[in-house]
Image: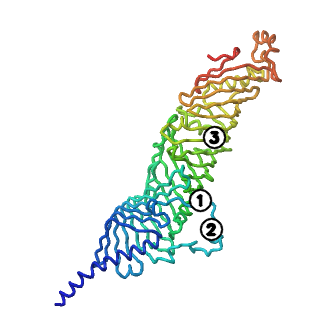
Amino acid sequence: MLVVVVATASMFARPVLSNWVRTELARHVENHFDGTLNVDSFDVVLFPVVRIEGTGLKLRRNAAPDGPPLISAERFSATTSLRKIWNGGVKQIAVTGLTIYIAPGSRPSLNRKSPTAQGQAPGTPERAVADSRSGLHVDEILATNSRLEIAPNDPAGLPLVFDITHARLTDFSPDKAAEYEAKLVNPKPRGEVISSGSFGPWRADDPRQTEIAGLYSLAKADMSVFPGIGGTLDSAGHFTGALQALSVEGTATMPDFTVDTGGHPMRLDTSFSTRVDATNGNTYLDRVAATLGKSKISATGEVAGTKTSGGKTIRLKVTSDSALLEDFIYLVVSEDQAPMRGQLSFTSTMELPPGDEPVIEAIKLAGNFTITRGRFASDLVQDKVDELSRRGQGKPKDTEIDNVMSTFSGTYAMGNGVLQLPRFQFTVNGAGVTLAGHYAMRGEQLDFTGQLRLRAKISQTTTGFKSFLLKAVDPFFRKQGSGTVLPIRISGSVQKPEFKLNLFNRKG
């Protein structure tokens, strides 16, 4: 008889308890996130432990009932006890196909003061609306195949999207940050990011203000997905801030960075400090310090884009006061050694738009440069430079004038794989050249015209009978304080340049 009574009581009690579990759990979730919860299916097993399974979860914020769900999930399950649910607690939640959508909100300040600076005690959350209305506490949350999308405030901006293959949060509650571990997929260049740190407490009034901090690492990302370059990228660092405004500091290393026109692997090390602004999806590079080979480079800029652009455009201002010319030339030319060496300083703006076009054609550069102590690797070219210096000094037979150092300076602009040099100056002892023209990166072809100025008179550039004959024309080539001024043209390739007088100012 007792067994019958217990069994009968259980039959009537189970639906009541199951409905209570569903109602109570939904109440805690809705209060914590300030939203309305709906599910396609919800099943409860009460014994030996409370186990919940469901599909089609959607949680919409009360502040935006017609907008996309704040949280959605294909499948979910939870284990807990009746006592825990009574107190707003869940032992474990497992979610598959989770999507968290952070809707547009107020524009953040990327230089927000710390809580202490605002008169708040260290370690105290600024304001967690949920903690006065909900006691929801989850010991562990496991999520697989998840997605975090932070929508931009700017309608033309691109969202920040994080594909998360696995995540684990522990001690999730309304009044303190939860600890997390996560594995994310970096889409381009593709690689696995491992991250850990703290998340929360959740800001139900403004989810974009929810704080996150942690460490990350990215290993062996393949850079060949960007047309025209190659190599593998390793990066590590730390980040902190609100979801809408993160500050990131880290390092990146490519031991085998290559450009397809050169094909020579070179080491590239970088350290950086950036800000990620979720209101427009852009990343601002406050500081980038890079070393290519032995050359030091500094940069600032942004990685920004719009929906119409179809991706992010990189815009940088790059400077260097202590670079080696050969590091840059060796990277982009196919010869076994750089055709020229020297000390390089430059200032440049760089723009690299999104797309599948090879980097060498897509990149746009503009700036100015100075090369000192320049010396050519080709004996043919260096011999011509030495000869130029001898003739410019009026000592054409002086073989002690050898391995002459050259100085270069000018302004430049690069687009479509062609380097334009509207003003290019080249000087050696006794001579100077002013040129204008272009250099095609593919094929390494030169085409420049300009003037050659010599300190010596034209008759002093040679000896014997030729010198005697040229004395008659010295006055015709003496101009503006120079002993000789000649129009010239330089064409051909970097390895085999052709130097010609351009007396009729014609090409060809």
Q: Disc 2 vs disc 1: which is toward the camera?
A: 1
Contact check, label 3 and label 2, Cβ < 8 Å: no
Dot placed on the residue nearer the N-terminal end, 3 or 2: 2
Q: Position of residue 53 (x, y in %)?
A: 31, 69
Any mark on residue 114, and which? 2
Give the distance between the C-alpha atoms of the residues marked 2 and 1, in whole angstroms.
17 Å
Any mark on residue 107, and which? 1
Q: Disc 1 vs disc 3: which is toward the camera?
A: 1
* Residue lying at 52% horizontally and 43% vertically, measured from the top left: 309
Q: Which residue is mark 3?
A: 324
Give the distance between the C-alpha atoms of the residues marked 1 and 3, in whole angstroms.
43 Å
Q: Position of residue 49 (x, y in %)?
A: 30, 78
Q: Is residue 16 left or right of residue 277?
A: left
- Position of the C terminus, as image quadrant, is top right
For mark 1, does the 10 Å Cα neighbourhood hold few (<14), some (14 to 19), or many (20 or more) residues? some
Front one among 479 and 284: 284
For mark 2, does the 10 Å Cα neighbourhood hold few (<14), some (14 to 19), or many (20 or more) residues? few
Q: Helix, strand, or loop for circle 2? A: loop
Q: Helix, strand, or loop for circle 3? A: strand
Dot placed on the residue nearer the N-terminal end, 1 or 3: 1
Q: Position of residue 273 (x, y in %)?
A: 60, 55
Q: Is residue 77 left or right of residue 134?
A: left
Determine which quarter of the picture holds residue 478: top right
Front one among 249 and 244: 244
